[in-house]
Structure formats: C-alpha cells, structure tokens
Amino acid sequence: MTMRDALVQAMHLPGDSDTFRQLQESGLAIADEDTMSRAIHDVYCGITADHEHPNEKDHAQARAMIDALQKAAASQSQA
C-alpha cells in the first residue's frame, strides 16, 4: 500500500480527493521513511554522492527526522 493510499484510507477520503494538493499548497508534506530518506539523500548527498539511492544512513536519518517531527507535533497539540 502506498503512503497516499494509506492516508486516503485512514482519512476515509474518496479516491479522487484533492486533499494532497491542498496540503501541499498549505506548505505541508506527507512523508514516510521511504520518501524522507529519498529527500535526505537528494538534499544532503546530491549529485556528489558515491551512491545512487538512499543508503542505510539516509534511512536512519529519515527515521530520526520523522520521530522528531512526531514529537514536535505532539508537544504542540498539548500546549
């Protein structure tokens, strides 16, 4: 199941919903470990990387970033 499919199912959205576009236009991004590790690889490794795809370090950084984002979001909602 793709990340988009999982979100559509969790939010009980119709398949043709423009929710993703609206979120993106609002400056939000939806990410899981795979998309975050690709973003980290693109930004921090770039064209000078000695590897073509995200490696384990990129995935570890993605997990850490997602964890930090979830903690920050949770603490904001409690404030």
Image (cartoon, rainbow, N blue to C red):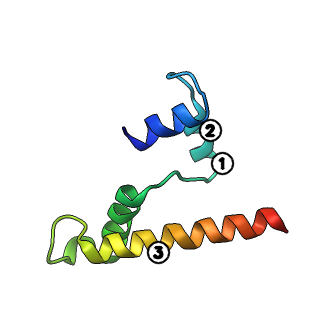
How far across and how far down the image is residue 39, in percent? 38, 63
How far across and how far down the image is residue 74, in percent? 71, 65
Q: Toward the viewer: 56 or 47?
A: 56
Q: Name the quarter where the N terminus is drawn.
A: top left
Please, what secondary structure does the residue beneath circle 1 have? loop
Foreground tag (3 vs 1): 3
Which residue, given by chain and number where applicable, does mark 1 sit on?
Answer: 26
Q: Name the quarter where the C terminus is drawn.
A: bottom right
Q: What is the number of callouts on the image?
A: 3
CB-based contact (under 8 Å), mark 1 and mark 2: yes
Q: In the rendered image of this protein, does residue 4 appear above or below residue 72?
A: above
Please, what secondary structure does the residue beneath circle 2 have? helix
Q: Which mark is residue 22?
A: 2
How far across and how far down the image is residue 50, in percent? 14, 78
Residue type at numbered disc 3: Ala
Residue type at numbered disc 2: Gln
In the drawing, does residue 37 fall left or right of residue 26? left
Q: In the rendered image of this protein, does residue 53 appear above or below residue 8?
A: below
State the separation of the CA atoms marked 3 and 1. Answer: 24 Å
Please tell me in which quadrant of the rendered image residue 70 appears.
bottom right
Residue extending farthest to the right is 79
Please, what secondary structure does the residue beneath circle 3 have? helix
Q: Toward the viewer: 46 or 41?
A: 41
- For marks 2 and 3 on the same chain, the one whose residue lies earlier in the sequence: 2
How far across and how far down the image is residue 71, in percent? 64, 70
CB-based contact (under 8 Å), mark 3 and mark 1: no
State the separation of the CA atoms marked 2 and 3. Answer: 27 Å
State the separation of the CA atoms marked 1 and 2. Answer: 6 Å
Residue type at numbered disc 1: Ser
Which residue, given by chain and number where applicable, does mark 3 sit on?
Answer: 64
Residue drawn at x 36%, y 75% is 60
